[in-house]
Image (tube, rainbow, N blue to C red):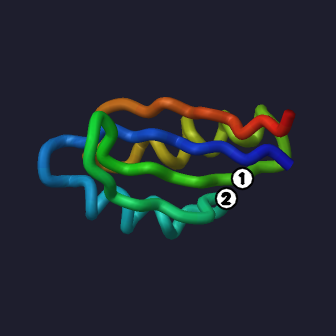
């Protein structure tokens, strides 16, 4: 199992809508609107890195209002 934080920049005023919509996606554990350089932070999990990439590219990025994503896989050292 791979877990990752997905940092999202949105169009102005869309952070809450984007977070709400992303929360409904399978594999998303939480999605919160935040302040700072990113507008939404998502915590997600997938079976492997390929499945994580599939989640981001086919389900997260198409959400209306998203400008850019940055995926940060969790490592355990």
- Residue at 13% across, 45% down: 12
Q: Residues within 10 Å of mark 1 (few under 14, many from 20)?
A: many
Label disc, if present, on residue 45 of the rendered structure: 1
Looking at the image, which is closer to me, 69 or 59? 69
Left or right of residue 77, residue 18 in this image = left
| Secondary structure of residue under mark 2 | loop
Q: Residues within 10 Å of mark 2 (few under 14, many from 20)?
A: some
First in sequence: mark 1 vs mark 2: 2
Looking at the image, which is closer to me, 21 or 19? 19
Left or right of residue 55, residue 69 in this image = left
Q: In which quarter of the image is the C terminus?
A: top right
| Secondary structure of residue under mark 1 | strand
Q: Name the spot of residue 70 as percent of width and height, x first.
A: 49, 30
- Residue at 37% across, 50% down: 40
Looking at the image, which is closer to me, 42 or 63? 42
Q: Name the spot of residue 68 as percent of width and height, x first.
A: 36, 30
> How many numbered discs, if any?
2
Quarter of the image where one finds residue 28: bottom right
Left or right of residue 64, residue 2 in this image = right
Label disc, if present, on residue 36 of the rendered structure: none
The residues bearing labels 1 and 2 have C-alpha atoms spaced at a distance of 5 Å
Residue contact at pointers 1 and 2, CB within 8 angstroms? yes
Left or right of residue 44, residue 59 in this image = left
- Residue at 60% across, 33% down: 72
Q: Name the spot of residue 2 as percent of width and height, x first.
A: 79, 44
Q: Name the spot of residue 66 as percent of width and height, x first.
A: 32, 41
- Residue at 20% across, 53% down: 14
Residue position for label 2: 27
For this orientation, the residue located farthest to the left is: 12
């Amino acid at each position: 199992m791979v877990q990752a934080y997905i940092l999202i920049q949105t169009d102005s005023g869309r952070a809450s809508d984007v977070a709400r919509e992303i929360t409904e996606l399978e594999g998303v554990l939480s999605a919160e609107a935040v302040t700072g350089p990113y507008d939404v932070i998502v915590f997600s999990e997938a079976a492997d890195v390929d499945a994580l990439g599939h989640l981001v590219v086919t389900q997260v990025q198409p959400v209306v209002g998203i400008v850019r994503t940055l995926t940060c896989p969790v490592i355990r050292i």
